[in-house]
Image (cartoon, rainbow, N blue to C red):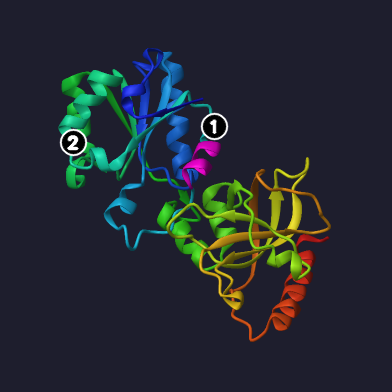
Amino acid sequence: MQLIRGRRHLHESLRGCVVTIGGYDGIHLGHQALLERLREHGRRLSRPTMMLTFEPLPREHFLPTDPPPRLTTLRERWRLICGMGLDAMCLLRFCTIRNTPGEQFVQMLVSEFGVPAIVVGHDFRFGRRGDYSVSELQAAGERLGFTVDVVPPVLVDGERVSSTAIRTALDAGDLKRAERWLGRPYSMRGRVVRGKRLGRELGYPTANLRLERRRSPLAGIFAVRVHGVATQALPGVASLGTRPTVDGVEPLLEAHIFDFSGDLYGREIEVEFVQKLREELRFDSVEALIVQMEQDAAAARSILKV
């Protein structure tokens, strides 16, 4: 799958592609229904398929000091989409197009991308101030010669699947509910960075990942499985937060893998959250923190059956 950074880098082989447009934060079951419909149109028309998405996400741009928690970083979105059978993902800088009127944006899709069909969700809006609706997009398609396929919402247990609902579930520590709506366990991915080696000094060496997002959708202590270290996922316990007992500032994901002693610096790993154990706390002493870490590890081992 091709990653295209900006429409000026669009390869001629992708002209005439079938397109879907949106933020696609989380790539949940609703998003997956859109992508399946996109692939169907690609097969029907014998055309390449492309996701047109944005960085930063629109609400991050409009709410820079209080953005919504982000389910997936760009790296995580890319990794997920790579396994979904699309031909390309085109990344647009939202700040450069935010004031583009909807009609002008549609004209760009026709003149530069040559789209024969566009797949969107039922609540899709775009253009300056989000003033261009699905019905206006359909009317433009009739004038300009492309079809618009509007995919209805996906329901799970009678509730509409959405990124907002998944954020709410994760914030409440309801990982099972989030998993049902995502169609997979919630996880975070990144490259292991060097920390202050405090975990090693306390007897619990950790693989540290920067969150690469302004706000995390969850925090606390978790039983986890770590992918990308061995052929199978390895069990462990992880902390996601600022480490208040040692006066930490930067939020980090720190995963301790049980019974593992290898060097993971620079390796890309994925941490799958299995169950929340507790909230992050400030302890009166490092000794009290170690006692709690031992209890957390025991609880995680019990949950993961190791």
**Residue 220 position in % (x across, y down):** 59, 69
Q: Is residue 250 above or below residue 86?
A: below
Q: How busy is the neighbourhood of tag 1: few (under 14 within 10 Å), some, or many (20 plus)?
A: some
Queried whether the magenta region covers residue 38, the answer comes back as no
Queried whether the magenta region covers residue 74, the answer comes back as yes
Q: How busy is the neighbourhood of tag 2: few (under 14 within 10 Å), some, or many (20 plus)?
A: many
Q: Which residue is mark 2?
A: 102
**Residue 281 position in % (x across, y down):** 59, 78
Which three-letter amino acid code belongs to the residue tagged 1? Cys
Which three-letter amino acid code belongs to the residue tagged 2? Gly
Q: Secondary structure at mark 2?
A: helix
Q: Residue at x 79, y 67 (%)?
A: 302
Q: Is residue 249 above or below residue 121?
A: below
Q: In front: 116, or 155?
A: 116
Span colored in magenta = 73-80
Q: Is residue 164 left or right of residue 262?
A: left
Which mark identifies residue 59? none
Marks 2 and 1: in contact by CB < 8 Å? no
Quarter-of-image position of residue 128? top left
Q: Residue at x 77, y 74 (%)?
A: 294
Which mark identifies residue 82? 1
**Residue 186 position in % (x across, y down):** 58, 53
Residue 123 visible at all = yes
Q: Secondary structure at mark 1?
A: helix
Q: In front: 46, or 170?
A: 170
Point out the residue furthest to the front here.
196
